[in-house]
Amino acid sequence: MAVETLGSRSPAKVSPWNDPVVRGWVFQIVVVGLVGLLAWFLVSNTVENLQRQKIASGFHYLEREAGFEIGDTMIAYSPASTYARAILVGLLNTLKVAVLGIFLSTILGTLIGVGRLSPNWLLAKVCEGYVEMFRNVPLLLWLFLIYKVISEAFPGPRQAIDVLSTFFLSNRGLYFPVPLASPVHAWMGLALLAGIAATVVMKRWARKRQDATGQPFPVIWAGFGLVLGLPLLVWLLGGAPHQMSWPELKGFNFEGGTVIQPEFTALLVGLVLYTSAFVAEIVRSGILALNKGQSEAAMAIGLSRAQVMRLVLLPQALRIIVPPMTSQYLNITKNSSLAIAIGYPDLVASVNVTINQTGQAIENILIIMAAYLSVSLSISAFMNWYNKRIALRER
């Protein structure tokens, strides 16, 4: 009988299913296939049901005439404009509220957060009461309250509060004069952007100069000079156009000039007051997370409390504050959709009217989702870039 030696024994075969990499790929392919199958089932059934009920589908309706007014517009719009332009007007209104809200809530929230850490007992308690009051009441209720106060606290247009025959305040809004459109204004806008870009470049140059020589440079005043001086210079070179459109009472309302409507004011004030309460807590917690020795060392070299906060604590706390602050910026953008509750024509309001007139709810809801998704991802990308830029780097 032949004896099998150890060297002649054939290696055991390993099943591919025992390989974790192979199993991982198989599971992923199966999951993707099931998700695709579910999506195909939902889409096909939706299209079939729409056809059965003779409901139009697709986005061709965007090219049709909208036929409805929008009270607050940043670009030219009339009822003869298309649905696409009406939705664009609503999107721009949403972006306007979001940008102003982010800017103002950051400033107010930072002040309140620093105020909660003040050694002044009264100031600290007032800031604490503000935070607790706004954080524990739903935003929608604040919007209703602020809008009701604004609409009832001021008289009608005929009894409007006249300030120097220039500003007119009524329950229809704040009317004030604006310059008439001129080609020079476009060049002034470009000059403003050029001034901002030049200020950024100058700030970097001043930092390198100070690191090399120790000599500081008045970046703030020079920046103000560039940002304000360049548009002013363009205005003077363009003939200094100064024609104005003045508001005048005609009939039951004012005509001419421009107006800040009460719906916009109520929405912006409500969002800023509500979000700044959360921002204040983020700022306060970020400062408290720092080592107490930072402030003690700063005060030991003679810095005042204000200088310690501005030059030592806040710059270091910024690295802790930025990540949670991103969530609040996203919240203020998404919470602006509550504008429909007080009648401000934002993106949701414009699309809602479009749905009522066209009956194509699915397409319009997809437009809203895509718009908010794009804006939110843009904010997140910018904040992530800024967070990486200010992060500590090991040398």
Image (cartoon, rainbow, N blue to C red):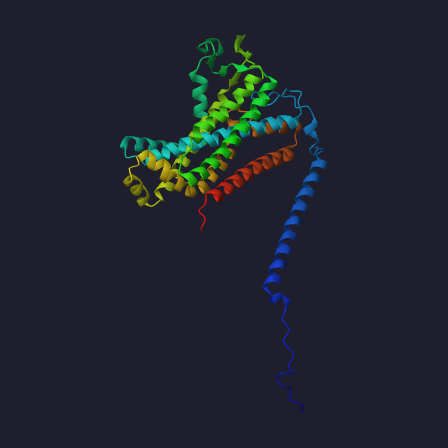
Q: Nearer the viewer, residue 277 or 167?
A: 167
Residue drawn where x is 63% and y is 69% of the image? 15
Q: Is residue 100 left or right of residue 215?
A: right
Q: Is residue 313 left or right of residue 150?
A: left
Q: Nearer the viewer, residue 256 or 35?
A: 256
Q: Is residue 56 left or right of residue 157?
A: right
On the image, the x and y values in percent for residue 193 come to 55, 28
On the image, the x and y values in percent for residue 122 come to 28, 30
Q: Is residue 224 visible?
A: yes
Q: Is residue 357 above or below residue 36?
A: above
Q: Total marks drawn?
A: 0
Which residue occupies the extreme front position in the image? 213
On the image, the x and y values in percent for residue 48 come to 71, 40
Q: Is residue 241 above or below residue 92?
A: above
Which residue occupies the extreme bottom position in the image? 1
Q: Is residue 312 above or below residue 274?
A: below
Quarter holding residue 287: top left
Q: Is residue 274 visible?
A: no
Q: Quadrant of the N terminus?
A: bottom right
Q: Nearer the viewer, residue 286 or 260?
A: 286
